[in-house]
Image (cartoon, rainbow, N blue to C red):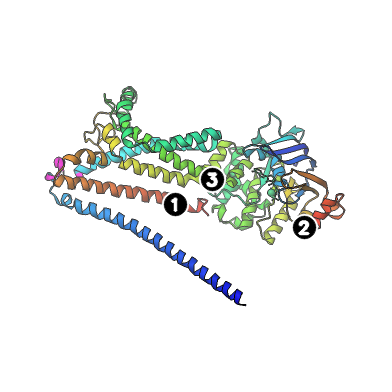
Amino acid sequence: MTTTATAARGEARREARARAGDRIFKGTSTAAGILILLILAAVAIFLLIQAIPALRAPAEEVMGGEGLLGYIAPLLFGTILSSVIALVIATPLAVGIALFISHYAPRRMAQGLGYAVDLLAAVPSIVYGLWGFTWLAPRLTPLYRWLSDNLGFIPLFAGPASPTGRTMFTAGVVLAVMILPIVTALSREVFLQTPRLHEEAALALGATRWETIRYAVIPYGRSGVVSAAMLGLGRALGETMAVAIVLSATGAVTFNLIGSTNPSTIPANIALTFPEATGLDVSVLIASGLVLFVITFGVNMLARWVVNRRAEFSGAN
Amino acid sequence: MAKLIDVSDLNIYYGDFLAVEDVTMTIEPRAVTALIGPSGCGKSTFLRSLNRMHEVIPGARVEGKVVMDGQDLYGSDIDPVTVRRQIGMVFQRPNPFPTMSIYENVAAGIKLNAKRMKKSDLDELVERSLRGANLWNEVKDRLNRPGAGLSGGQQQRLCIARAIAIQPDVLLMDEPCSALDPISTLAVEDLIEQLKLEYTIVIVTHNMQQAARVSDKTAFFNLAAVGKPGKVVEIDDTATIFSNPSQKATEDYISGRFG
Ligand SMILES: Nc1ncnc2c1ncn2[C@@H]1O[C@H](COP(=O)(O)OP(=O)(O)OP(=O)(O)O)[C@@H](O)[C@H]1O
Ligand SMILES: [Mg+2]
């Protein structure tokens, strides 16, 4: 009698403790979530307040003399253009490498490759910048010359080709190399998690390895790859040093990727201009940072929307 | 269409581990062969070796012969992909492609095999397969909804429809009803009854009544001890196995007196 009663009381106490644990966990996780939102809001507010003088300033006082919009628009164009080039080059390559590691390479080799990719992701961006400037750019100039001679009718390759090779295209390639590891690593993780059951379903229908990948692996990993690409895009949008070093920026808005006149990007421009900026100029630069902040946010929203659009077909259920 | 499979001296390995030893049996066409036996005795392993699904597991291999229609399925000139197109498979857990609609799921195998087909022909084939799997009436109004949105029993019948859509010669089923309620189970059993008019069927089941109800032949697998390879103890007409087995072990297992 007494023993069961004590046991029951012990049981109850244990339960209460478990519930306390639940509460603590819930409290901390909620706090962490709110904290993140607060930080985000604080950043936005800071940028906004600091940008107000620039927003109010008369057009001719803003750097360049064409108003805030006239100053930021070319930068924004350059930012998006370089990032899109990077994404277009890096994503297919990353998916290919990830599939090779997850489904084709022998196990030993896959492991080695996996480590190599992870290591590449840890290389600081300044190193990529130096590599792009000293090694890649000179080696791309013959290609640019060829492109402008033979494919010059395409606006992207209109030329005249830059003699230094420090073009938008080179910057895009450097950014692509930079984001390749992270996109690859994330895609590989997603592909490795494809349920065996789905792969076997395809195999049992008489699918070849490539067909299995098309039927089971890629559909399962699609939303993950989109997220990975968006993460890469985020990195490319915000990349400062690599672009600042590689790109020879003149401020022109042009789709010509291989010429000597190129738009700069927002982060590279901030890095290059900030040291000498005073007064209103600082405010203008911060306003451009605010624009970047909004764009990055928009990209993330877009990614989320893309992922959710086919959520009921995602296999998450 | 239905074909006879002759298995002789088949040893099945996972790496160095011999999982199933020395299987010799004939699987009759237009009949249902049931594989029964305690857990871990190698029923699934044996079943998967019949359509060369065994070897997709790293390190897995077999020795011996599986002959269908005079052709050794493990011959050096045989592509496992072709074998799997002739020998369909239904798994224990329903596994429709989650990103595909019901229609696309059924058409998946056809798209792999025939490549191009007129839309109207494909529609017809999808309908015929879904009817064949007793699922048409339940899904005909929502063919474009995701396959994963069906109930478990419906998903399993969808998988059967997908398997029979490519018109295989043989259909392998690994505990197809173990995740299903009694009504869906009956539906699948009825389906097996119909399918055996056209296909050679091999089914693994833990349900003795089910084996007795649906199968014509029954093979009893057993293993001497944990870690030892599984073996076929006895294979005979289902009626004989369940009424008058020749081996003591079979009788013990069937009557539930199993250690
Ligand atoms: N992927 C694998 N790797 C290594 N060994 C395996 C693997 N799958 C199964 N085995 C082993 O092979 C033996 C037979 O397993 P199998 O799955 O064929 O048994 P089963 O008769 O289907 O059992 P159940 O009735 O529980 O499904 C077991 O000893 C099991 O541990
Ligand atoms: Mg099994």
Q: Quadrant of residue A129?
A: top left
Give the residue type that dot 1 points to: Arg
Subunit under mark 1: A
In the image: residue B135, left or right of residue A160: right
Beta carbon at label 1 within 8 Å of ligand 1: no
Front residue of B69/B224: it is B224
Residue B147, relative to residue A26: is it above or below?
above
Q: Measured from the top left, where is residue B210 in percent x and y?
A: 75, 56
Residue A156 position (above or below residue B170): above
Q: For the residues tagged 2 and 3, is the chain the same?
A: no
Bounds of the magenta span?
A61-69
Whether residue B220 appears in this view of the structure is: yes
**Marks 3 and 1 in Cβ contact (< 8 Å):** no
In the depicted view, which residue is nearer to us: B258 or A186? B258
Q: Residue at 51%, 46% (x, y): give it.
A: A220
Pinpoint residue B191: horizontal percent, then vertical percent: 71, 53
Q: Which residue is the site of mark 3?
A: A194
Label 2 sits on residue = B209
Q: Check disc 1 and report its element: helix, strand or loop.
A: helix
Hey, which quadrant is residue A233 in on the image? Answer: top left
For label 2, the crowd category at 10 Å Cα-Cα, with few meaning under 14, some 14 to 19 and many 20 or more, is: few
Residue type indicated by callout 3 = Thr
Mark 1 = which residue? Answer: A309
Q: Is residue A92 above or below residue A20?
A: above
